[in-house]
Amino acid sequence: MIGKLDLIENEYGAVHLAALPGAYANETMHDSYGRRINYMRISLTDACNLRCVYCMPEQMKFRPRHELMSDEEILFLVRGASLGVNKIRLTGGEPSIRPGVVDWVAAIAQTPGVTDLAMTTNGVLLDKLARPLAAAGLKRVNISIDTLNPEKFNKITRWGAIDDVWRSILAAEEAGLRPVKLNSVVVRNFNDTADMIDLARLTLENEWEVRFIEMMPFGEISDFQQSNVVTFQEMRARIEAVFGPLEEASYDYVDPSRPFRIPGALGTLGFISSVTEPFCQGCGRVRLTADGKLRLCLLRDNEVDLLTPLRAGADFEEMRELMRAGAYHKPWGHGLAQGVFADNRSMNQLGG
Ligand code: SAM
Ligand code: SF4
């Protein structure tokens, strides 16, 4: 399978991907504000085996297969056109449900210039995949877990079983996918009370990073998302009411998560405050959606269509130029405070 992924053989002719880039790994992309674009989040699919209330409506319809990029098309873009991208995160939808995900990881991990390859997953299938993914070159995982309460977990994901996720967290740690990061989107009246405290307590004994995320509004469920957001300040106050003042850990502008520590804890707490305190000055990310659009900012609808020209026969040079020009026009800042929402996609189509 990996061998197959190294060769694109279709209407564009046959190209050995392995023979291509590397040459491009030394080039860089910048936007018009001087931010270096070196981080790409790739959605392998918009489909998911859960339906989290903060992410998508229950009756979500997923895209038909022919609208999604093929394996070869994704690799064509990653290896042949993404200039100077050294950090890649696979996401979705749920990336682990894409067939051949282990081969995928191997093919991307072997791409010259890629030094960091991670995945964001709901953990339902990671129990069995953690070891093969690590062997294929995956470095780390972020696992979504919004509460430790089984009934609440079931309600927030609409049908998930927390035991599956818990097994996966342990399997990830054992497979060396460290440091394990746990993502929790905090939703008022769902998981904003004891849940945060239970999750924060995990860091006392484990070298994990538990990250609390402000819920962001998208598309048709934006009313629900806006009216149930819990702010960073509120989350911090609730945690400090139990554990006392948090210590600030070092701040890395590349990571949107602000790290803190409960005094004496082995692990850290992170807060991702995209809504109330955005981190746009340090943002070097672009997103590749499963349907082949280069998304320039999570919270703005600006996108560059890469799949249509690719299917029309554009060559590597043309695709690189599209990618470079798109990255240059990456917007600065989101418009949530002005009531401007991204509404052309839901979160499962963006990858977080
Ligand atoms: N299915 C995988 C998962 O849940 O980890 C990957 C895709 S999911 C869209 C990526 C991340 O986005 C997850 O950590 C999820 O909790 C987060 N997320 C989903 N909807 C969100 C929202 N409305 N606001 C903030 N984060 C959200
Ligand atoms: Fe699926 Fe992840 Fe969205 Fe939950 S957050 S519905 S697991 S894509």
Image (spheres, rainbow, N blue to C red):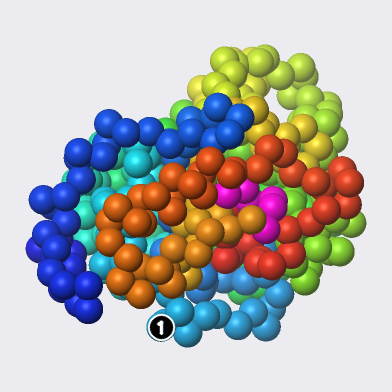
Quadrant in which the N terminus is drawn: bottom left
Is residue 175 shown left or right of residue 87?
left
Mark 1, secondary structure of its residue:
helix
Q: Which residue is mark 1?
A: 66
- Residue at 58 percent across and 65 percent down: it is 348
Mark 1: give few (<14), some (14-19) or many (20+) Cα within 10 Å.
few
User: Residue 350, located in which quarter of the rendered image?
Assistant: bottom right
Q: Which of the pair 217/157 is nearer the observer?
A: 217
**Residue 44 location in percent, x, y?**
41, 64
Q: Is residue 113 visible?
A: yes
Horizontally, residue 23 falls left or right of residue 343, namely left
Q: Is residue 315 left or right of residue 110?
A: right
Please tell me whether residue 69 is drawn above or below residue 25 in the rendered image. Answer: below
In magenta stretch: residue 31: no
Q: Is residue 5 left or right of residue 130?
A: left
Question: Could you tell me which residue is drawn at 65 percent across and 43 percent down?
Answer: 331
Amino acid type at mark 1: His
Depth order, front residue of 291/159: 291
Measuring from the top left, give residue 41's x and y in whole percent. 46, 50
Query: Where residue 116 appears, x then y in whole percent?
Result: 34, 37
Give residue 343's quadrant in the image: bottom right
Residue shown at 26% from the left, 67% from the top: 72
First to last magenta residue range: 296-301
Q: Is residue 128 visible?
A: no
- Please state the horizontal and vertical placement of residue 60, each as a whole percent of the image: 64, 79
Q: Is mark 1 within 8 Å of ligand 2?
A: no
Secondary structure mainly formed by the magenta segment = loop
Residue at 83% x, 31% y is: 233
